[in-house]
Amino acid sequence: MRVALFATCVNDAVYPSTAVATVKVLERLGVTVDFPSAQTCCGQPQYNTGYRLETEPLVHRMARAFEGYDYVVAPSGSCVAMVRDNYPRIGTRARAEGRGDTLLQASDYLVPRTCELTEFLVDVLGVTDVGAYFPHRVTYHPSCHGLRVLGLNDRPRRLLQAVKGLELVELPGAEECCGFGGTFAVKNPDVSAAMGADKIRNSLSTGADVLCGADNSCLMHLGGMMRRQDTPQRALHLAEILASTEEEPLA
């Protein structure tokens, strides 16, 4: 089984520790992980802002970068949702406009191979206990893309529940959006900040040490607000919790 890591732009530029943690978890489970250096952006920022034609070269580039792999694994529900939900739309639109089938071919190749991390662990590898140790109280925020587009459902919670030492507490209003929404946060900053404040207030009410999520875009939004409020709680990606062990506990 040939597996490639799709690190994503946010992780590569801001949260490289999440990409490193993803590889640690997969290698601990016996998976050999490649990192194709040709990978760049999946095109989500461009597409969400209305630049559809500018997104098309990135679809081609993604297909070339991950050619030959059985699975492409990303610790980001939003980027995986971009590939699985929007790449077919882009390809279908290009065909309808008389620009051939190459984008549909790229989509057809990538869609069945691209997995969000928790999907790959639970559905492909068939594991929930990855050998992690994290002695903290944790609450989990499901991102909109993971919840509504990918249908991750209880996969992240099952993985967290299997972590030794971890106490998982339910987040009130968990299924409500955190307010980030990519360019939504830029176009509607006041609404975005208000939604983030609601999410943080609910998270703090749990008494958890850590607000966990599977999308660093959400965690960037919430974590930044937490730092400005100087809360006792921190935001941390699920992969970093799963990478933590008794031998190498994460700070």
Image (cartoon, grey):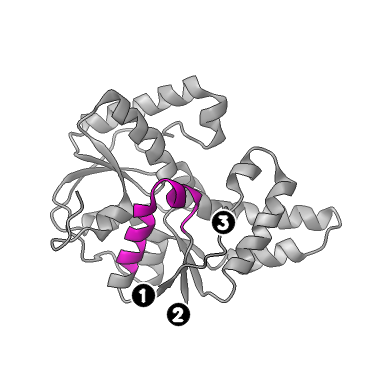
Tell me what residue is drawn at x 57 percent, y 26 percent.
187
Left or right, 155 with respect to 100, comes to left
Tell me: residue 79, above or below residue 35.
Answer: above
Residue type, numbered disc 3: Thr
Q: Disc 1 on helix, strand or loop?
A: loop
Q: Disc 3 on helix, strand or loop?
A: loop
Q: Nearer the viewer, mark 2 or mark 3?
A: 3
Tell me what residue is drawn at x 39 percent, y 57 percent.
19
Classed neighbour count for the residue bearing mark 3: other residues with Cα under 10 Å, few (<14), some (14–19), many (≥20) = some
Q: Nearer the viewer, mark 3 or mark 1?
A: 3
Q: Which residues are magenta?
A: 7-26
Residue 76 has which mark?
A: none
Residue type, numbered disc 2: Met
Classed neighbour count for the residue bearing mark 1: other residues with Cα under 10 Å, few (<14), some (14–19), many (≥20) = some
Whole-percent x and y of residue 103? Answer: 72, 61
Tell me: residue 193, above or below residue 122.
Answer: above
Is residue 19 part of the magenta span, yes or no?
A: yes
Which residue does the numbered mark 2 point to in the structure image? 1
Return the disc, 3 or 1, that comes first in the chain's sequence.
1
Front residue of 145 and 223: 223
Instruction: Examine the rendering and report whether any part of residue 245 can be seen.
Output: yes
Q: Residue furthest top?
A: 190
Quadrant of the drawing holding the N terminus: bottom left
Q: Residue furthest bottom?
A: 1
Is the Cβ of the residue at disc 2 closer than 8 Å to that at disc 1?
yes
Residue 40 has which mark?
A: 3
Predominant SS along the magenta part? helix
Whole-percent x and y of residue 36? Answer: 51, 68
Residue 31 has which mark?
A: 1
Is residue 38 part of the magenta span, yes or no?
A: no
